[in-house]
Amino acid sequence: MATAQKPLRRDAPLAEVLERAQNADPRAVARLISLVEDDSPALREVAAALAPHTGRAQVLGLTGSPGVGKSTSTNALVAAIRKQDKRVGVLAVDPSSPFSGGALLGDRVRMQDHATDSGVYIRSMASRGHLGGLSWATPQAVRVLDAAGCDVVMVETVGVGQAEVDVASLADTTVVLLAPGMGDGIQAAKAGILEIADIFVVNKADRDGADQVVRDLNGMLRLGGRHAEAGAWRPEIVSTVASEGKGIDDVLTAIDKHRAWMEESGELHRRRLRRAAAEIEAIAVKTLRERMGDLRGQQALGSLAAAVVEGRQDPYVSADRLIDGLSSE
Amino acid sequence: MATAQKPLRRDAPLAEVLERAQNADPRAVARLISLVEDDSPALREVAAALAPHTGRAQVLGLTGSPGVGKSTSTNALVAAIRKQDKRVGVLAVDPSSPFSGGALLGDRVRMQDHATDSGVYIRSMASRGHLGGLSWATPQAVRVLDAAGCDVVMVETVGVGQAEVDVASLADTTVVLLAPGMGDGIQAAKAGILEIADIFVVNKADRDGADQVVRDLNGMLRLGGRHAEAGAWRPEIVSTVASEGKGIDDVLTAIDKHRAWMEESGELHRRRLRRAAAEIEAIAVKTLRERMGDLRGQQALGSLAAAVVEGRQDPYVSADRLIDGLSSE
């Protein structure tokens, strides 16, 4: 990502790590994102130090079903953004690794194309199940990359269920990838992606059925929803063959167009307010959950659970007791 | 589901709906599950009335990627369980419809095979994004079916990310479906399904590559994880062609075997305690979230969000303020 010459000592004080991260030292950035992944107590200090330096990066969300070509598309987009001489950070969030600590799809595999480029920082993150992985940790990692001077932060995740809602909630612009031959016509409708997509990319456009995917999308957009309102953004549909770099510039053009609309319409500010509210709420919920778990060494929750299993008490009354316990601690 | 003759009046009092649901009147069951979907204030009363009648049903989770044949497999399993003269409730949870009120995959489509069978109740539910759809609402719907006398409650959901973790956390036995030709070898590893599967079903076993999927699974199981511990359950691997009903009895046999192990080992009770604890916690978190949103008409969260967007305050400090506001209300 940049110019730091000295290695970062393992026992470097946080102040030094923070300073070096703000000067785009990739090792310092890595250290800070690891603190996020580890849910380190130092995060409060990190968040306080970074806050004044955030809010500059453009945040792009990229989502789609397995097999549509997300990694290839991300790589191609990174290359195209780099040609504009912008710094890029990529967070590849794997919401399907809830229990393990590390994403299986290693950073090294993904970084190949950009390994020697100091203007690109790529990081895989595993999101971790019940404590609200993506909703809590990813925005904090975005903050780190933002404060480290990334002009663009791309958050890539598998597009199913809550993960894609979360990615949409933290992005300025959400790109949904589709590909022919994956039943995506139906998947699109099922997945509620119409609600989150600012731009549709139909990848593998050289394959049979790509035109049909575009037609299906156009058909669904005509059916209305939030896009039918006056002054609303109508999602662009772009065809690509990411493996050959075809259409990637069109994706960037669509992103720029959406960005311009966001600024003109005031939607950018509204989205960032919503994102901050969601972020605050996620941290508050996480904190409250930890307190609930900690109540008298989990005994409170354990005995409430036993009462529910035995049918002696319903879960609503039990939840009330749990909440009462929070304030009497 | 059973024998109720009279239609259920729209304005029937809750007491009547509850009584009829406990007598397996499908219209009353539908009414109660709608209350869950609508997050009705009446749910507290419903939960209290049902609590003594729950804990009897065997809860099966069924999950897998789009296209592996979940609906077909569910239908075949329902038919096989019905031959044992057990009552079956099916909840098809669609975690990919976060914003819309209803699941697009209608109940009517899915019920075709069992429409005339009063021993089967099938219901699609949309889970709804940030308020913790599956984690909060699904266990309540399971309670309704349990109290209505279902011997088996099957919860079917798309197996990606948080949804499959949630379904595993509420099931006695979790069945993970795979199929050849979907990159499932890699998907399996990525998806952390080894952590949640009690039984693997390799569907479409008549297709090329099915043997390879079985080999891959066996290979991964040999690598260890929680299954390698002494006395642990080693997940069964069953091959099926659900569309022809092949192998379905083997799946039921594996489920019975797992059930027997669960009872012997004490794991059934432990899982149910964990499930109840998660359920209580989900309701408590939902309640606290509602209180946070309600704080002075959302103004508290709004002004905290503005401070974060402007870099004046970090999200941790903002979350502390939000929590402080809860107790001073």
Image (spheres, coloured by chain):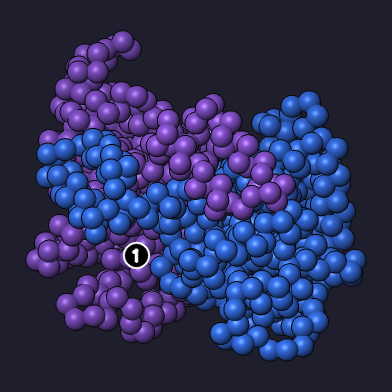
Chain colours: A blue, B purple
Q: Position of residue B109 (x, y in %)?
A: 44, 36
Image position of A230 with respect to B79: above or below: above
Q: Position of residue B117 (x, y in %)?
A: 25, 34
Count of labels shown?
1
**Residue B126 left/right relative to A207:** left
Residue at the limit of the structure toward the left, as seen here: B264
Q: Residue at x 45, y 48 (%)?
A: A285
**Camera-side residue: B279 or B147?**
B279
**Camera-side residue: B198 or B192?**
B192
Q: Residue at x 13, y 40 (%)?
A: A311
Image position of B109 with respect to B219: above or below: above
Q: Quadrant of the N terminus of chain B?
A: top left
Image position of B294 with respect to A255: above or below: above
**Camera-side residue: A8 or B192?**
A8
Q: Quadrant of residue A278?
A: top right
Say which chain tag 1 marks.
B
Q: Can residue B128 be seen by looking at this rendering?
A: yes
**Camera-side residue: A37 or B141?**
A37
Q: Amino acid at mark 1?
A: Ile
**Residue B118 left/right relative to A279:** left
**Residue A212 left/right relative to A318:** right
Q: Can residue B184 be seen by looking at this rendering?
A: no
Q: Position of residue A44 (x, y in %)?
A: 54, 61
Residue corresponding to mark 1: B196
Q: Residue at x 81, y 68 (%)?
A: A87
Query: What is the crowding at mark 1: few (fewer than 14 residues within 10 Å), some, or many (at least 20)?
Result: many
Secondary element at tag 1: helix
Q: Quadrant of the C terminus of chain B?
A: top left
Q: Quadrant of residue B40?
A: top left
Q: Position of residue B100 (x, y in %)?
A: 54, 34
